[in-house]
C-alpha cells in the first residue's frame, strides 16, 4: 500500500520540528529517538521509516537547509552582496527553527563549517588575493558575521533584517567607533 506523499512529508516534517525544538534545548547526545517519536505523536518504528538514527536526521536537516539556500541564491544575480544575500536567505521565517537548533548553544560545529563553505567570499571581499593571510581574513569575516547572526537570532531578531545587515556592513567598514 502506497502512502500519500503529503502525509509522508507531513510526518517527516513533524519529526524534524520536534528534533529542532529538542536540539535547541539540549545536546544531541541527550536526545533519543523515543523522545522524538513520543513528542511527534508517532512510535519509534515510524521514525525509523524516515531516518536510520538521530545523526541521519541532523544530516537531513542540514542538507535540506543548505540546498534551499543554494536554490534561492542561485536565483539571485551574483553581486558584491553575497554575504548579505545569504544572511537575508538565512533570516527567513521558515528557516528560523532549524537555525535556532543548528546555531544554538548545542548546535553543530560541523554545520558552521559547511555553512562557511557555502560563502564564496574571497572574490567579493576587498582583501588581497593569494596572500598568505587571506584565509585568516576570510575566516575572520565569516566567523564574525555568523556570530553576529547567531546573536541576532538569540535576541529574537530585535532589529529589522535590513538594519542588521547595515550594522554588520558598518562594523566591517568603519568599526565600532561610529557607534560609541
Image (cartoon, rainbow, N blue to C red):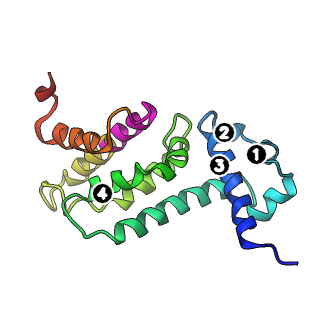
Determine the secondary structure under disc 4: helix
Q: Quadrant location of the N terminus?
A: bottom right
Label 1, residues with CA under 10 Å away: few <14, some 14-19, many ≥20: many
Q: Which residues are magenta?
A: 145-157
Determine the secondary structure under disc 1: helix
Cα separation between marks 2 and 1: 8 Å
Q: Which mark is residue 36?
A: 1
State left or right for residue 96 relative to residue 123.
Answer: right
Q: Which mark is residue 85?
A: 4
Q: Which mark is residue 17?
A: 3
Cα separation between marks 4 and 2: 29 Å
Determine the secondary structure under disc 2: helix
Cα separation between marks 4 and 3: 25 Å
- Tag 3 or tag 1, which sits nearer the N-term? 3
Q: Is residue 1 magenta?
A: no
Residue 34, located in which quarter of the rendered image?
top right
Cα separation between marks 3 and 2: 9 Å
State left or right for residue 93 relative to residue 44.
Answer: left
Of badges 1 and 3, the one in the foreground is: 3
Task: Determine which residue is flagged by label 2.
Answer: 22
Cα separation between marks 4 and 1: 33 Å
Of badges 4 and 2, the one in the foreground is: 4
In percent of the image, x 15 and y 57: which residue is there? 131
Viewer can see residue 55:
no
State left or right for residue 107 relative to residue 85.
Answer: right
Q: Are marks 4 and 2 in contact (CB under 8 Å)?
A: no
Q: Position of residue 64 (x, y in %)?
A: 55, 62
In percent of the image, x 80 and y 64: which residue is there? 49
Up-down relation of residue 66 to residue 39 (above or below): below
Amino acid at each position: 500500500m502506497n502512502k500519500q506523499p503529503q502525509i509522508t512529508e507531513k510526518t517527516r516534517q513533524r519529526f524534524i520540528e520536534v528534533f529542532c525544538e529538542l536540539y535547541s534545548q539540549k545536546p544531541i547526545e541527550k536526545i533519543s529517538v523515543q523522545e522524538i517519536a513520543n513528542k511527534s505523536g508517532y512510535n519509534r518504528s515510524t521514525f525509523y521509516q524516515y531516518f536510520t538514527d538521530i545523526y541521519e536526521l541532523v544530516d537531513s536537516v542540514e542538507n535540506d537547509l543548505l540546498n534551499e539556500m543554494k536554490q534561492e541564491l542561485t536565483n539571485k544575480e551574483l553581486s558584491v552582496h553575497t554575504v548579505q544575500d545569504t544572511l537575508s536567505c538565512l533570516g527567513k521565517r521558515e528557516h528560523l527553527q532549524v537555525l535556532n537548533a543548528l546555531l544554538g548553544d548545542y548546535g553543530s560545529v560541523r554545520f558552521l563549517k559547511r555553512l562557511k563553505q557555502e560563502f564564496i567570499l574571497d572574490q567579493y571581499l576587498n582583501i588581497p588575493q593569494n596572500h598568505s593571510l587571506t584565509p585568516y581574513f576570510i575566516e575572520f569575516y565569516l566567523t564574525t558575521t555568523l556570530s553576529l547572526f547567531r546573536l541576532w537570532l538569540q535576541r529574537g531578531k530585535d532589529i529589522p533584517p535590513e538594519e542588521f545587515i547595515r550594522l554588520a556592513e558598518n562594523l566591517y567598514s568603519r568599526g565600532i567607533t561610529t557607534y560609541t
